[in-house]
Image (cartoon, rainbow, N blue to C red):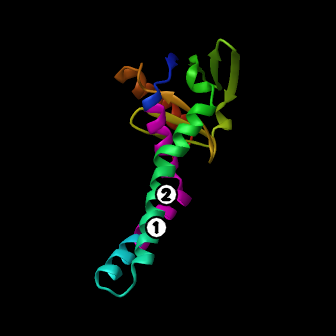
Amino acid sequence: MQLSFSYDKKKVIQALRYHFISRPEIRTLIILVNVFAIVAAILFYTKKISPGPFLLSSLLWILLMVSFWFILPFSIYRRSATFKEEFIIFFYDHHVRLESMRGFVDWNWNEFSHFIESPHFFHLYFSPKSFFLIPKENMDTAFETDLRGILQRKITRK
């Protein structure tokens, strides 16, 4: 099986957001800040606390959302030349080959720790913070189903 693809900026940004939000430590942080903001709002409304903690929780919530929703994804997209290239990826029994104008790389299936699926991509993870995105954009339903089956057989899904 093979697939030719390039990246769409808006979809890559969304995939990077999906990656950040799916990280357990970030999800926990978001939950804690949201709980803090809700508790501070309730206590402020009932006049049990001054406006300071409420404003602090609101500011923390805004900074957290802005950083995970805008700053991190856009900065990673801007720094990575990968998202501006065109690729051909080949799926073989023992490895995956990725080719571009700059050359090629072969990855054995055991180099991938896990994969996840988002609305527009398959995320193939090498480690918790290192991954490669395969866009679903140029895939028909049969190819997508076949690829999902190969990934489930060759890589454990998280």
Residue at 39% over, 85% down: 49
Residue at 52% over, 33% down: 151
- Residue ranking furthest to the bottom: 48
Q: Is residue 100 above or below residue 157?
A: above
Q: Is residue 44 above or below residue 57?
A: below
Labels 1 and 2: the sequence-earlier one: 1
Mark 2 is surrounded, within 10 Å at the Cα level, by few (under 14), some (14 to 19) or many (20 or more) other residues, namely some
- Residue ranking furthest to the top: 101
Q: Position of residue 153 (x, y in %)?
A: 53, 35
How far is disc 1 from disc 2 in space, using C-alphas?
8 Å
54 and 127: which is toward the camera: 54
The secondary structure type at the circle numbered 1 is helix
Would residue 69 be counted in the magenta stretch?
no
**Residue range (magenta):** 11-36
The secondary structure type at the circle numbered 2 is helix
Left or right, residue 105 beside residue 134: right
Q: Which residue is mark 1?
A: 33
Residue at 62% over, 30% down: 80
Q: Position of residue 43 (x, y in %)?
A: 35, 82
Query: In the rendered structure, which amino acid carries the disc numbered 2?
Result: Leu
Asked if the residue under mark 2 is in contact with the one under mark 1, i.e. CB atoms within 8 Å, the reply is yes
15 and 92: which is toward the camera: 15
Query: In the rendered structure, which amino acid carries the disc numbered 1?
Result: Val
